[in-house]
Image (cartoon, helix red, strand yellow):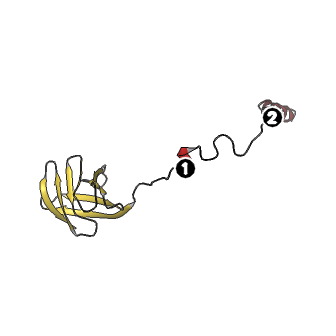
Amino acid sequence: MTRNPIVFTLVAAAALAGCNKENHTIVAGGPDAGDNNVVANTPIQLPPTIAASKIYRCGDNSVVYVDWLSDNKSANVRTAANGSPTQVVSAEPGKPLTGSGISLSGSATESSVKIDRPGHGSQSCSV
C-alpha cells in the first residue's frame, strides 16, 4: 500500500516537469493574415469525380473496365477488375481520349466504344 502514493507522486512530478513556464501570447491577424497569403487566396480545383463506371466486352472476347470522369475529358481504363487504372485524357470533350498507348473513343452515355490498345489493336467494345 505504501508504494501507490510514491508511484503517484513520481508520475505527477514527471508530468509537471514537462511543463514549459514561458509566456505564450497568441495574436490574431499575425503575419500570415491578409491578402499577402497568395496560396490561401487562390481558387482550388478538385479532381473530377467518376460520372459512370462501365464494363465493355470487346470483339476478341476481352473485357475493358472504364471509369468515365465528370470533366468529360478523361477516363480511367483497366484491363482487369482489380488492375491498376490507366488515365486517358483529351484536350476537349468529344475527342478521342489517349494515354500510355491507349486510345478510347466514345462517351459514358453510349453503349459501345472504340478502343485501341497495345497487343489488341483497334476494336469495338460494347456493354
Badge 2 element: loop
Badge 1 element: helix
Residue at 24% across / 69% down in the picture?
110
Q: Nearest the camera: 102 or 53? A: 102
Which residue corresponds to mark 1?
A: 41
* Residue 34 percent location from the top left of the image: 63, 47
Q: Amino acid at mark 1?
A: Asn
Single out the mark in the foreground, 1 or 2: 1
Residue 53 image label: none
Residue at 16% across / 48% down in the picture?
118
Residue at 27% across / 58% down in the picture?
65
Q: What's the distance in space between the residues labelled 1 and 2, CA to CA? A: 32 Å
Q: Amino acid at mark 2?
A: Asn
Sequence-wise first label, 1 or 2: 2
Q: Residues within 10 Å of mark 2 (few under 14, many from 20)?
A: few
* Residue 23 percent location from the top left of the image: 80, 34
Q: Nearest the camera: 104 or 67? A: 104
Q: Give the side of residue 69 with respect to residue 107, left or right.
A: right
* Residue 15 percent location from the top left of the image: 78, 34
- Residue 95 vertical placement versus 18 (above, below): below
Q: Give the side of residue 39 with respect to residue 2, left or right.
A: left
* Residue 94 percent location from the top left of the image: 25, 63
Seen as rendered, the residue at the extreme front is 35
User: Which image quadrant: the N terminus?
Assistant: top right
Q: Nearest the camera: 93 or 66? A: 93
User: Which image quadrant: the C terminus?
Assistant: bottom left
Residue 23 image label: 2
Q: Quadrant of residue 60?
A: bottom left
